[in-house]
Each structure stands twice: as structure tokens, then as C-alpha cells.
Image (cartoon, rainbow, N blue to C red):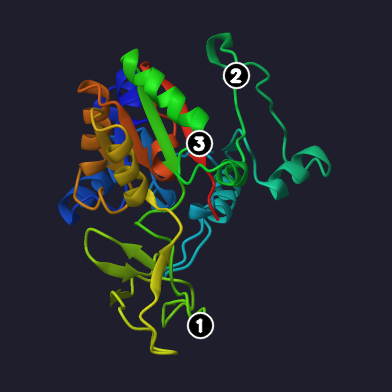
Amino acid sequence: MIDRFISRFGKETIAVIHSKLSLGEKYDEWNKIKTKKAKIVIGARSAIFAPIENLGIIIIDEEHDSSYKSETNPKYDAKEVAKYIAKQNKCPLVLGSATPDLGDYYKAKEKKEIKLLELRKRANDATLPKVTIIDLKQELASGNRSVLSRELYKNIEENLKNKKQTILFLNRRGYSTFVMCRNCGYVVKCKNCNISLTYHSYEKKMKCHYCGYEEKLLSICPECGSNKIRYFGTGTQKLEEEIQKQFPEASTIRMDIDTVSKKNSHEEILNKFKKENIDILIGTQMVVKGHHFPNVTLVRSNNSR
């Protein structure tokens, strides 16, 4: 998004605010806004507090996303803050989404509290891609124990032959989504959040994806003393391992919170995928957010639970 805005409006008129900036960078961007050098502010939810004086419009893209609510202190809902600021500045607030929040859609469609604007055509009159829904239970029943369906395997194989790129989206990071004792059914949970810990194979740890709590791997069940500790579910690490096993000739890259912790790593991974023509990009929801990769002809989404 930053690249697109810079190409149209120039770098000097744009300020960027997000948590990956250093304190010095944050100060420079904040000062750029305060001194009115920046006319456009782009950022994550914290950008809603930017010190803009002559505000003309607020746009919240992907407005349905739950991440606009901050679960850490100070807790706030960026959408609600935006509504208040828009009212104070008497400026429009645009909530953009292909899959709008049900509450907002109801307010627009039924209660008429929000003006509904619909885009009935895709950009450049593009046609919707073919979507195939595959029940992996049926795959398992027919003897396929892989995380890849037979059709997906065939499509990836065809893409590799044609030198095309593939994106595999899985909404679970880590290796296995929960750890359980097969003897008594005990599931390892976070002592703070009481949700199951996720196994991360590269670090040999179990982690809570809510508060960051970590534990070492278990070999003995603390409930019954059994050694029948097993790992269930599939995360991005496991999917990456499976892809490398089934397509050893393919180049892969993974993008999730574990691989983008360093500064600028997010941009580096996307640029590497695009410029080096890497065959397969594997990742969580950040791989499906408004990217433009002309050579990508196959996208797979697995909404595991």
C-alpha cells in the first residue's frame, strides 16, 4: 500500500506509523505530520491517533478485521476511535471491505445509519477465480493421510512445471496446534489464558499465541505419568516441511509472525518471493492481504480449526 501511494503522491507527502518503527523513526514520522509536511498518513491501528489538524477523510481498509481492537493496554477499538474523530472533524469515515462486519452491514442495509456504497465490478473487469471446496475428511477416508488433497497436489505439480507461483494460506502458525496425552486425554494449556499451547518444532518449545507464555516439550504426561505424548493439528511449519518433502525440487518461503519478527523482514520476504520467483509462499493471513503477484496462479486456503 505504501508503494502504491508513493508512486501516485510522492514520498514527501506520506507518513507511515506502525509498531516496527524505531523510536527515532516514530518521532520523525510524528513530527512530519505535526509540521503538516505529510498530507497522507498510512499505518496500523495506532495511526488513528496521528496529530493531523486539518483532517479531510479517514479510511479503514479491511474494516471487518478483529485486529482493529487492541487487546493490550491501552485497550481501544480503532474503528470506534475513528468514528469519534470523524465526528469531531466533520469529515467522512470510509469502512472498506469485500466481507464487511455484520454489524456495520446491518447498519448500512437495514437501519440506514451508514451509507452503503457497492462496487459491483472488479478492477479492470476481472473475473472471479474458480474456487473448489475439498473436504479433507473424504480424502482421509479414501486413504490420503497427507495435509494436501490429491487435487491440490496435482495443481501444485502443474504450477511447478509451468514455472508459475503458488500461495498456501493456513491460519495456524507453529508445527502442531495442540499437544495431548493419548492415554488420559490431557491437553497442555497456557497457565495464563487456559488455551492449548502450540508446538514449535524449530525452537523445540510449546507457545501460547495470545500472551507469549512458553514451556519446554513434555515427554511425560503430568496427569497420568504416561509417555504417550502426541502432537496434533497442522501449522505453517508442518505444512512447509510437508511441501519440501513432497516437492523437493520446489523453492519455498514461509511468512508468519515467527519469520517476520525482525525489522523489514515482512517486506524482504515479499520482495524475495516476487523478484526471485520463488515457487511456493506459505503463511498465515498476512500472505493474503492485498498483494499483487502476476505470476501467482494458484492459492490454497485451509481454514483449520
Kind of element beneath mark 1: loop
Indicate the quadrant containing the N terminus: top left, top right, bottom left or bottom right.
Answer: top left
Kind of element beneath mark 2: loop
Q: How many marks?
A: 3
* 10 Å crowding of disc 2: few (<14), some (14-19), many (20+): few
Amino acid carrying label 1: it is Cys
Q: Can see residue 92?
A: no
Q: Nearer the viewer, residue 285 or 252?
A: 252
Q: Distance of mark 2 from mark 3, alpha carbons?
A: 22 Å
Q: Which residue is mark 1?
A: 184
Residue at the far left in the pictured view: 24
Position of 209 relative to 104 (above/below): below
Residue drawn at x 32%, y 50% is 237
Q: Position of residue 276 (x, y in %)?
A: 20, 23
Q: Which residue is mark 3?
A: 149
Give the label on residue 128, or none: 2
